[in-house]
Image: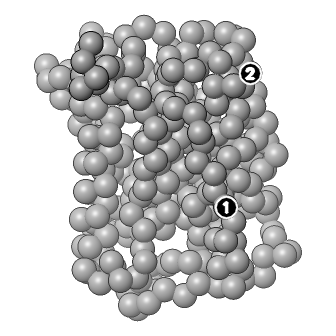
Amino acid sequence: MSSDVIPKYCMERGLRRAVIINNVHFQPRPMARHVAYPTRDYSAVDVANLYPVLRALNFAIEIHNDKTARQMTDIANHEAACISAGSTGSVQCFLLLVLSYGEFGLLEGVDTTLSADALIKPFKGDTCKTLAGKPKIFIFQACCPDLYSIERLHGGHVVADDDAVTRTNKTYKIPGDADFHITWSLVPGNLPSTPSCDIRQPSLFLYNLIAVLNDECAAQRGGQAAQEYQTLLTKVLRRVDARLEAIVGTSYVNLDLPLPATINMLTKALYFPVDVTV
């Protein structure tokens, strides 16, 4: 086979497994004097919309709500151990979504901060050999609540608190194993995904991810060929970019408001064929 021909991950047989950790209510943080962690009420909309589209993509889904940092790590370790033991069946693709506060490399449990590495490491090839050579997808919807707000954006500036600035100096390690795909969305969680804005609005990134995946399912059921995962994400990023510009104008580029970022270490093309008979 020519090295120019990109092979595909085998997704026609075996299981696709998704785990969602959704943190909504946060405990008081005595040491975090400058950072408030308000309730993420809008996250319920994200989970409610994620579930049917992931089921349509043939994922078996498990949802965990309001977990401490230790519990989040335990969930990752337990999941990797179950996959390795085969107790969850023959898993061909694993997906972990974390909906919480955080910043690049760091996530918030309901009680304290943890490194994203703690959730990724259990699935590396040396610890979870069953997933070696198979796609492992991580999506982190995590924004720092005090770095950005819709009021500050409309005011034309962003104010960072001392604690948040200090936290960004922590190091994030990119996993060395192949077959990982990691997406970080640091876009503020309650930026309006549609022209109206209220607390029930879903997250801007997830809203558009779900819309693109729903379109993909409909297209496949209409007879069109599946599109590669990175192509789908590019569509999502273009939609997010357009919506951010509509919210705060072209000046948002100068506000250091981050677009979602992807780290792609997949060694094959990733497609999610849909069972069109369902």
Q: Quadrant of the C terminus?
A: top left
Q: Quadrant of residue 243?
A: bottom left
Q: Residue at x 62, y 62 (%)?
A: 102
State how the image is colored. one colour
10 Å crowding of disc 1: few (<14), some (14-19), many (20+)? few
Residue 119 x, y percent position in the rendering: 68, 41
| Amino acid type for the residue under numbered disc 2 | Ala
Element type at mark 2 = helix
Residue 127 x, y percent position in the rendering: 72, 25
| Residue situated in front as seen by the camera: 77 or 31 | 77
* Residue 46, numbered circle: none
For the residues bearing labels 2 and 1, Cβ distance under 8 angstroms: no
Residue 102 vertical position relative to residue 17 in the rendered view, above or below: below
Q: Residue at x 60, y 42 (%)?
A: 175
Q: Quadrant of residue 241?
A: bottom left
Q: Residue at x 47, y 57 (%)?
A: 185
Q: Is residue 41 left or right of residue 156?
A: right
* Residue 81, numbered circle: 2
Q: Which residue is mark 1?
A: 171
Residue 115 x, y percent position in the rendering: 71, 53
In the image, which is nearer the foreground, mark 2 or mark 1?
1
| Amino acid type for the residue under numbered disc 1 | Thr
| Residue situated in front as seen by the camera: 222 or 137 | 137
Residue 13 x, y percent position in the rendering: 42, 8
Q: Residue at x 32, y 45 (%)?
A: 233
Q: Is residue 72 left or right of residue 273?
A: right
Whether residue 127 is visible:
yes
Query: Marks 2 and 1, Cα distance to the nearest angstrom?
Result: 27 Å
Q: Quadrant of the N terminus?
A: top left
